[in-house]
Amino acid sequence: MKPTNLRLCRSILFLPASNPRAIEKARGLPADMIILDCEDAVKPEDKAVARAAAVDAVADGFGDRPSVIRMNGHGTQHYEEDILAFRHSEAAFVIVPKAEDHHQVEDAAGLLGKPVLAMIETAPGVLNAPAIAPRTAGLIAGTNDLSADLGIALGAGRAGLVHSLQMVVLAARAAGVAAFDGVYNKLEDEEGLARQCEEGKGFGFDGKSLIHPAQIDIANRIFGPGPEEVDAAERLIAAATGGAERYEGRMIEAMHVEQARAVLAKARR
């Protein structure tokens, strides 16, 4: 997979850059993107260690998967040091957390000299997502922080987030970039994770943010097309002759053919 084709990523795994065992283990995991987190997952006293470890980790790479670092946010005491370190790193992308306007994203991308992804984690970020998305390679819904910012009670579910999540997808699609759903916090609830993945796929997200290796297989299975979906895509492509036409009891056109080709591209991944 080319590192710029982020829409093929079904699973994006966050892990603390300060944890060398987790980094080494990640090299053998089937996540489509590995994210070395230097922000929320790292204690303040460990920031320098995490920063250096992230640079070393992306230098070694993760095979054909994009290596990504989540930096500390604009306005924090660690921002400038992160910029200096990650600018010259081998990271394919850098994640800008808590993006609230396009100036923050443009500033980081310009200083880093790298493409960035933006995390939408606050109400201003959601409202400004249409202006933020075109400056990025993708948007990531930061559902934990967003829930807190919106005043949604802990454990209340995602009903209050639906509008915001769809805003993130709409902004990403309008800009032609990737969109990733937020994390699922209950590590031992496989059924709950599967339901949330199905929901996120239904919203139009390309893949799922993950916080534990045990979540990877479920996200890959649900966000990756299954045998029936692949078979349907192949049949549609084979049957299409151009223009609007009747196919298996419904009308199809060029748009549906492109959707089918996207399904096959993700299946090959």
Image: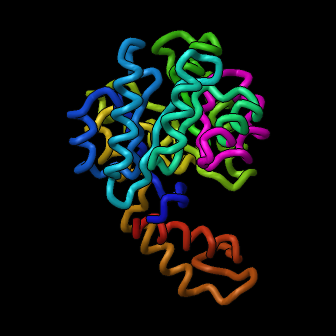
- Residue 24: x %, y % from top left: 22, 41
Residue at 62 percent of width and 47 percent of height:
113
- Residue 80: x %, y % from top left: 58, 25
* Residues shaded magenta: 110-137
Picture quadrant of residue 180: top right
The residue closer to the viewer here, 148 or 109, is 109
- Residue 126: x %, y % from top left: 71, 29
Residue at 46 percent of width and 53 percent of height:
9
Residue 83 in view here: yes
Residue 220: in magenta span: no
- Residue 2 relative to residue 136: left or right: left
Residue 158 in view here: no
Residue 58's place in the image compared with 143, above or below, is below
Callout count: 0
- Residue 18 relative to residue 40: left or right: left
- Residue 84 relative to residue 20: left or right: right
The residue closer to the viewer here, 253 or 70, is 70
Residue that lies at the very extreme toward the bottom in this rendered image: 241
Residue at 69 percent of width and 42 percent of height:
110
Which quarter of the rendering shows the C terminus? bottom left
Residue at 34 percent of width and 41 percent of height:
56
